[in-house]
Amino acid sequence: MDPCITTRSSKLPACDSRPRSCRKMLLLPFLLLELLVPVVLGWQVPFLHSSRQSELLRVAIIGAGAAGSSSAYHLRKFHKESGLSPDSLAITIYEKSDHVGGRSTTVNVLDDPNEPVELGASIFVRLNEILYNATREFKLRTTDSEPVLATLPDTLAIWDGASFVYMQSDADSEKWTWAKLVWKYGVRALWNTKKARDNVVKGFQGMYAPPYFPFSNLTSTVHALELDEATGTTGAEFLRNHGIEPEKTGSFGHDLIQASTRVNYAQNLGELHGLATMVCMATEGAMSVVGGNWRIFDEMVRASRADLKLGVEVERVQRRKDWLGGGAKWIVTDQQGGEGIYDHVILAAPYAQSNISILPPPPEGAIPEIEYVRLHVTLVATTASALDPAFFGMDEKAEMPTMLLTTTGENGSEPGFNSISVVRSLLSRNLHVWKIFSPSPPSHDFLSSIFGTSAQFPWIYRKEFDAYPKLRPRVEFARIELVEGEGMWFTNGMEGFVSTMETEALMGMNVAGLVMRREENMRKGKELSSAIALDPQLQFTKMHFSIDKIKDKVKDKLGRNDAPVVNDYENWMGGIMEKIGSKRIIDIAMPGTHDSAMHGDNMGHSLGLDAEKPVIDIWTRLTSVPLAGQIAGNVTTDIIKRWSQTQSHSLPNQLSLGMRYLDLRVCWHAVDQSFRLTHTVMTKTRVEEELAEVRAWVEAHPSEVVIIDFQHFYGLGEPEHQAFHTMLTQTLGPHLAPRSLISSPIRDYIAANTRIIVLYGDDPPIPSTGERPQGADAIKAQYEDVWPREGRIDSLWVNERTSEGLVTALDGVVNRRPAAADDPANNDRFWVLQGVMTASADDIKARPDHTLKEFGAESCNAAVHAKFRQLLNDDSGDDRRRAWIMIVDFPDIPNLDWVKDIIAWNERNSF
């Protein structure tokens, strides 16, 4: 049963299984009160168009219900709109049942195929955009109600187990119906309900169109659209918060609103959340497809050109290791032993009920457990044209309802069933088909008592199934992509939000949009790699950003009083050029920073490939837990980020503090095919954006030389390294210093305006997987504008967690440097002193509310600076005390006197 109908002016999902008479009369005041709400009907597919014919994209969809069918249909639609060849997309749908449509199912009364009746999802409305548009596209005939016997009056009543609390006849005029409602419940209750519903409508509309569509995170989208107040409280609380009494017998909330939630979701106001409550208050324009609503989804599957495997149950979905994202990622195995290999898998079925093994398992909490209402639906073909008045204590001549809803009685007592309604009249047989929703199967004695002892029952059909999710209040919803970047998608997170045919179809469309957006990003990356192979001078920046715009932006920032750091150290090399101009760059001392890009404003929300496996496990587990657990997850991720932050200033501002050495580690971000900087956590910005800021600073300081040390590259193969080098040449341009300048004086760098030295590091194994894509060596062998780190720089990480241990270790680093006479080759390399402390896991556990800044810089920088000063002022003649690059975290803590000491050493020209 599909809980759902929408108002003429809303996109709320249609929510009802009732005949037209009930729907019209129950919510007639809302038709009278309805104000037109603008509806955004059009949106453009947010994908770049491409004339390139991509390689085959393979997608598996598990489940052929509303979500799965919609996913397939919209995948094909968006793929076509992207300008790609139809043959470059292959969709396979696995459906364990023998039909398409999920809970949208029909049965044939008396086994007559000419008399189908909806067993479950019965109706939708004109402005359920996805479903209605599908009926028009596929030319499906619709009806606004199921035919009933003309002689039967349309009468609605609400029963509390002891008496009728409300009755309404179709014979009543609209004015009379309105007058009765106002007299019984008051204008305020009706008006407040309409206002509350309209606020929900306004938020819900945003899910269909940009900027929210396609949304990758349902939780954040619900919050952004301000729907979390409705999902986070019970229906009773939500109504009370909006001035509507929900529980008192005789109130509008208790009598009519709760009757609607019971027939639509089999849940009372104190059980389901406020959003579902408001969905039940949206009505008009209800319709169904002649022959069954399942035909919509059947046509969607046909239009998708999918390979539909009916009666095939999936047993296992296993991720195939593919670190770079190219080629197939998932192996789907069915219970008959068949296998398929796919780039994406869309799980469009309740996970807990699917019995599918996903390997590796989804992160804990990625799919919050959702319970379902176990409901009995009973279809009865009977000679009775009306309910028996005696059952209700009424006079035998009393007009009885053709639609009977229920609410709770005194002290919350239950009437024993949710609704009874006539849904079809078989004129040729003089039979009437009634539908009963109940928590337990109605007995034959019950049927005889409610329809009368003289009633005959030539046909009874019973079905028990998980009809609706238990829509408990929640503000956290299941992930849409179970693990970021891996291509395993889940549509049924929408079940905790609200369960309807339309919302499931919406999530199917949304996932299709996300898949195509992902593929567009992947396609751009592959096109880039192919183009680089053909043309090393490819204008890389045209695909990603405008260097000139970023340079202008940075220059503008440097011109503002609040952004730049202007001091005596900003142009220190130019200030002492007479002293150092004749020296080699390796023969001067210079200050620098460690993990230079990890300043607070630039730290993103994704782990880098350099993250150790225990950190990944904790991060994944705790960012996925629902509800209160999410708070713990957020706190944990915040702890990881705070203990990963090493700087307070942007790269340009670090240079203005006097730093001339920048330590950077590069990570390949497979999700959006970009290069990011990383220190456990990836940066928000791409590498090229950071480098463009460095270039802008260098161009504004014509007498300064900067060293950029790319120590490590994580996850880059040779194509990505080629792309990275192209990006370097396009971003840093003519300022890259060729390695042939190693023996030249500094003034040659200045004269040639080649004042950026790039040290190119290695490809270490990815800690979490041990995989080691490689490509750095090819770049170092091929290009003169990068300097290989091997044999050119010595930078020892001492891994000390106390200031005393660190100072002692620095002495050890100095002493391990061979004297010039003993090892002449060492005269041609940079030597680095890493004055940084490293926190252990125990340190972080003991100080979860601290930061690396507090643990390291604030506790040890003063001692490190003193050690640097001691080394710089050493006149013993030991040439191991000659030029060093000295790096720290948070360089201006406690002050910048150590930079002044380095400048003074260079001025003394003591070596």
Image (spheres, helix red, strand yellow):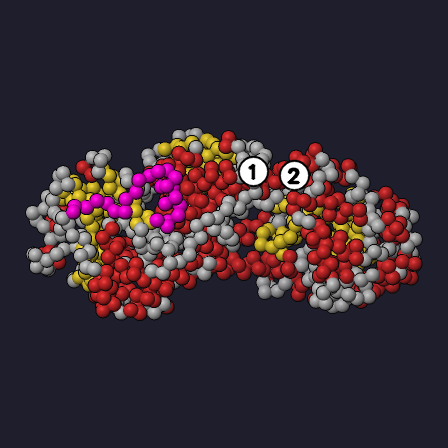
Vertical side of 443 occupied by 704: above or below: below
Residue tagged 1: 321
| Quarter residue 299 falls in | top left
How far, Cα to Cα, is label 2 from label 1?
A: 23 Å
Where are the magenta residues, as a range?
126-150
Picture coordinates of residue 345 (x, y %)? 47, 39
Vertical side of 311 occupied by 477: above or below: below
In the image, 53 versus 480, the foreground residue is 53
Q: Residue at x 63, y 37 (%)?
A: 527
Residue type for callout 1: Lys
Say whether residue 581 is left or right of residue 450: right
Q: Residue at x 48, y 48 (%)?
A: 43
Specify the label residue 308 is tagged with: none
Residue type for callout 2: Leu
Quadrant of the drawing holding the C terminus: bottom right
Which callout, 2 or 1, points to the residue nearer the camera? 2
Q: Residue at x 64, y 52 (%)?
A: 685
Mark 2 neighbour class, 10 Å CA radius: few under 14, some 14 to 19, many 20 or more:
many
Mark 1 neighbour class, 10 Å CA radius: few under 14, some 14 to 19, many 20 or more:
few
In the image, 43 versus 440, the foreground residue is 43
| Quarter residue 38 falls in | bottom left
Specify the label residue 528 is tagged with: 2
